[in-house]
Amino acid sequence: MGPRSPSAASSALLFLLLLGSSGFLQSYAVEVDIKDASNATCLYARWMMSFFIKYETNSSDYKNTTLNLSSSVTHNGSVCGNDTHAALLAVQFGEGHSWSINFTKTNETYQGDLITFTYNTNDTAVFPDAKRKGPVTIVVKDTMSPVQLNNVFVCHSIESFEAENVTQIFWNVTVQAFVQNGTIGEKESRCPADTPTSAPTVPPTVANITTASTTTLSPAPTTAPKPVENPDTGNYSLKIGNKTCLLATVGLQLNVSHDKPVLINVNPKTTSADGTCGNTTAMLKLNDGNSTLISFTFVVKNTSAGVPKFYLKEVNVTLLNRLNGSVISSADNNNFSKWDAFLGSSYMCRKEQTLEISDDIQIHTFNLWIQPFLVKANKFSTAEECFADSDLNFLIPIAVGMALGFLIILVFISYIIGRRKSRTGYQSV
């Protein structure tokens, strides 16, 4: 449960404006107290988490879904651990889903090791048309730094792990492994992402499992919105081994609407790229490290002339907010047919474009240049430009040509007038 960067300041405003929107999903907080043979606490944790999963459907398409914790969670299989054996925190929820993390110990510290997440596509409420049926297991390495024994690890900031089409999201984490003498420590070890001024976390009342409590929020202050400048352009790429398989250059701006629109620029300096490359499908996933996850899915199609082209088919936006860590929103549109170009070339559009993800979420793109397939020598291939750019390219030579035409006409008229004047001067008297 290691930390990532804290949410941007705009996240709090976004939360206040969008609270209560039908697109937001409520996850539950989990509190687990594991006891040893003498009924003393040996492992304690309280946290919130959610999962963003991309899965294949019966029609061989791909869909995105969000899996949240249910109100009923068990912790079968959790063990205390000791000097020679790892501690294990394991929870089960919903229709056959489970999650666990093991902790290792040294003489002075403990830390998280492996996170194992299993989701069950037989859960038709979450995966209504999954092609693959049954449990799917994902294992990732935790990034939690070593914590002094008898200290409580606390991290309110959002953290996420991405692996095999699954993004695991955690926030409001409080955990202590290898609890000594059955007493939870009073000293905290904060994750770097939490601000130094964050209020200390009071150790909560020990209970096996509790659900999330409701939170009362103050209304957002009424202030005049400041104009938002165009976003900075970011450069993103994916690799297979040492070979680049996808290139993208784009500035991204989110337009989120509820009572009033909110514009949020994606900062390329804090945004990381992940995804997959394939022969007929490619996905670029962007994570700004605090509150926004965006994925673009490209596919290859055959044209009537038999020459394959690629195009943008699906875009998913997941908005996170760390204000009390209680809200996640996900919007998806898998019916796009944009940014198409012949396979082996790239697509370019310098002008602003708008992608309608849902009624409440839009993405504005600026200075776009994308090539999701057949990248050679780590460089973009010849670009096919969008219609808006083509119009500009056509207008410039037309304007220049018209100006030259008028100039030629003026020269010709001046020449005719000059000849007439010269003839008049040589007439006989």
Image: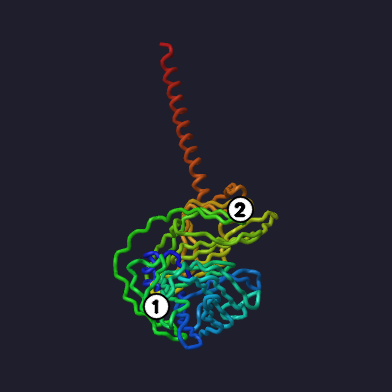
For label 2, count other residues whose C-alpha is less than 10 Å away and answer few (under 14), some (14-19) or many (20+): few
Instruction: Please give the residue where the numbered disc 1 appears in the rendered image.
Output: 185
Most distant residue in the top direction: 429
Q: Residue at 65% of width from left, 71% of height from top? A: 59
Q: Nearest the camera: 58 or 205?
A: 205
* Residue 108 seen in the figure: yes
Measured as percent of width and height from the top left, residue 44 is found at 45, 80
Query: Which residue is situated farthest in the right direction here?
Result: 306
Amino acid at dot 2? Asn
Taking the spot 37% from the left edge, 77% from the top edge, the residue there is: 186
Query: Is the residue 163 above or below the residue 352 in the image?
Result: below
- Position in image of residue 83 (x %, y %): 52, 75
Whether residue 101 is visible to the viewer of this picture, yes or no, is no
Task: Specify the quadrant of the image occupied by residue 95.
Answer: bottom right
Q: Position of residue 12 (x, y in %)?
A: 37, 69
Residue 204: name its quadrant.
Answer: bottom left
Amino acid type, mark 1: Gly
At horizontal 42% and vertical 60% (from top left) the residue drawn is 265
Q: Which mark is residue 242?
A: 2
Task: Name the one closer to the observer, 90 or 321.
Answer: 90
47 relative to 260, above or below? below
Residue 237 on image: x %, y %: 55, 55
Q: In this rendering, would 217 be left or right of 315? A: left
* Residue contact between numbered discs 1 and 2, judged by CB atoms under 8 Å: no
